[in-house]
Amino acid sequence: MEVQGLMTLPRFIIEEEKKHPEATGELSALLSELALAAKIISLEVNKAGLVDILGLANAVNVHGEDVKKLDMYAHHTIVKAMDHGGHLCVMASEEEEGIIPIPAHRKNGKYVMLFDPLDGSSNIDANVSIGTIFSIYRRVSPDGMPGTMEDLLQVGTEQVVAGYIVYGSSTIFVYTAGEGVHGFTLDPAVGEFLLSHHNIKVPEKANIYSINEGNYKYWHQGLKDYIKYLQAAEDEGRKPYSARYIGSMVADIHRNLLYGGIFMYPRDKRSPNGKLRLMYECNPMAFILEQAGGRAINGKKRIMEIKPEKLHQRVPIYIGSKNAVDTVEYYLRKAEEEGNGEDEE
Ligand code: AHM
Ligand code: MG
């Protein structure tokens, strides 16, 4: 689509849907509802330092981690914005252990949504970027009925739409519906997301690596070798990569998507499945990066081909520019062939 003039997110989605005569407009409506939730969360994030919303909510989430108040605010805002529209039949959130049904008196729609309401929440108190991540599938259970676990536990390749919202120096909504990746920046004065990044492609040449290097001593050999390779000195004929790690997956991946780089949350000797969740974090980000020309793997296979077993399942992830992911895959395989693989150690 050739973009002319001011393009708002709802107008863009409608224009995109027109390419598909069979489209019912439901997806547009669904994304507009989500954009509204994002605006409300953005407003709250921006005033987080001003109101008594910082600090712990005296609760732990299903992963045993502290839940900050703003996480819960974001969770409830999304549920409220999405459960009445008649487009979804079930939801799941990183902040809730079980499935989130659609209220009994409401219509059950044909889509399913999984989301991480506020990722990177340990950064909230420090004014550092945080984000929302979402993933939408078509239901597989019979129409009209409440959605089921089977609707939620679909393989990532079945995603219809995925995206994220970064609440940073500005608020940006990035999504893919399988036809490229597009970014919309919130104009706070107008209250609209305006197209700012059309058809994003991740640079092939990566210069940045993002990983929690504090875990070095728990890493397996292949990863240690790869990071050493990235830190090569100029006399080896290559420039070293820059290390950049915010600790907010959404912001780290967004930066690497724009500048070229690799983000990793590996498995290590303490955490055999890494930290990040397949359904809420890894699949949607993998869909975005693949659509932008990059790759996302768990070390051995494509993230989007992992068959999910449970809602809150964790997986290791290596995601970013294609060449960089190819190279880490090579180092992991090499270590395995040399008897230093992750399973051997
Ligand atoms: P959260 O969902 O509890 O916010 O945790 C996920 C976050 C990611 O955004 C980030 O990449 C990762 O945790 C950072 O973890 P660590 O502090 O172990 O490096
Ligand atoms: Mg998260």
Image (cartoon, rainbow, N blue to C red):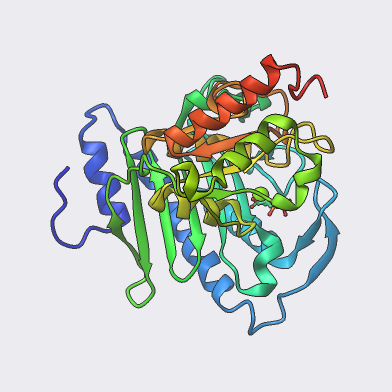
Residue 90 visible, this angle: no
From this view, report whether residue 247 is shown above or below residue 290. Answer: below
Q: Is residue 344 left or right of residue 276?
A: right
- Residue 18 vs residue 273, the one in the foreground: 273
- Residue 201 vs residue 308, the one in the foreground: 201
From this view, report whether residue 203 is shown above or below residue 179. Answer: below
Residue that extends furthest to the bottom in the rendered view of this protein: 50
Q: Is residue 18 left or right of residue 23?
A: left
Which quarter of the rendering shows the C terminus? top right
- Residue 312 vs residue 225, the one in the foreground: 225
Q: How many marks?
A: 0
From this view, report whether residue 344 is shown above or below residue 67. Answer: above
Residue that extends furthest to the front in the rendered view of this protein: 235
Could you say where residue 167 lies in the image, as x and y percent from the top left? 51, 64
Please report the residue visible at 73 percent of the width from the left and 66 percent of the height from the top.
69
Q: Is residue 327 left or right of residue 180?
A: right
Q: Quadrant of residue 238?
A: top left
Residue 236 visible, this angle: yes
Could you say where residue 77 lies in the image, as x and y percent from the top left? 59, 59
Please report the residue visible at 34 percent of the width from the left and 66 percent of the height from the top.
192
Could you say where residue 201 lies in the image, as x and y percent from the top left? 33, 43
Which quarter of the rendering shows the N terminus? top left
Please report the residue visible at 63 percent of the width from the left and 85 percent of the height from the top.
50
Could you say where residue 156 lies in the image, as x and y percent from the top left? 53, 27
From this view, report whether residue 152 is shown above or below residue 86. Answer: above
Please report the residue visible at 51 percent of the width from the left and 23 percent of the height from the top.
143
